[in-house]
Each structure stands twice: as C-alpha cells, then as structure tokens.
Image (cartoon, grey):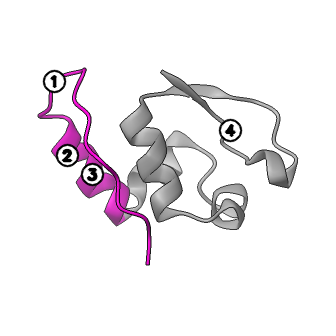
Amino acid sequence: MERHHPVPKSRRGRDTVPVHPICHRTIHAIFTNAELARTFYTPAALAAHPDVSRFLRWIAKKPPDFYASTHKRR
C-alpha cells in the first residue's frame, strides 16, 4: 500500500488514504494536481471519471498482487 493525498500536498492537502500502488500511479497519470484538488478529491468523484471507471473494471479481474507499468498522460 501507498499513501495518497486526495488533495495534493502542493495544494495544501494534509490527509492521506491507503491506495494500491498501481491505482496510485493511475490516478496521477490521469489527473494533474490541480484537477485532483479542484474536482477529484473524493473516491466517488474519481470512480465517476470514465478513464478511472474503465481502469477499475479492468483491475477488478486481477489478483491482489498484480502489477503493471503505468503509462503517463500525453
């Protein structure tokens, strides 16, 4: 597990939540810190985003120790 700041530290976020490493990397590959701070700071908001929703459906079929490289946003 890794610790994720729902509101990024660069945006004065202090709270953290546990997140699986591949999920954490995917969140940061999809969103900028500004987007996370402004809109996507709750689990429900993240899950509602089409890219995250697609990722969650895909990752749900994988074993808990699954790991794959994450591609950065273009």
Per the model, the C-alpha gap separating discs 4 and 3 is 20 Å
Marks 4 and 2: which is nearer the front? 4
Residue placed under numbered mark 1 in the picture: 63
Residue numbers of the magenta segment: 50-74
Per the model, the C-alpha gap separating discs 2 and 3 is 5 Å
Per the model, the C-alpha gap separating discs 4 and 2 is 23 Å
The three-letter amino acid code for the residue at tag 1 is Pro
Q: Are marks 2 and 3 in contact (CB under 8 Å)?
A: yes
Q: Earlier in the sequence, mark 4 or mark 2?
A: 4
Marks 1 and 3: which is nearer the front? 1
* Mark 4 element type: loop
Residue placed under numbered mark 2 in the picture: 57
Marks 1 and 2: which is nearer the front? 1
* Mark 3 element type: helix
Q: Is residue 53 magenta?
A: yes
| Dominant secondary-structure state across the stretch colored magenta | loop
* Mark 1 element type: loop
* Mark 2 element type: helix
Q: Are marks 1 and 3 in contact (CB under 8 Å)?
A: no
The three-letter amino acid code for the residue at tag 2 is Arg
Residue placed under numbered mark 4 in the picture: 5
Per the model, the C-alpha gap separating discs 4 and 1 is 25 Å
Q: Earlier in the sequence, mark 4 or mark 3?
A: 4
Q: Earlier in the sequence, mark 1 or mark 2?
A: 2
The three-letter amino acid code for the residue at tag 4 is His
Residue placed under numbered mark 3 in the picture: 55
The three-letter amino acid code for the residue at tag 3 is Phe
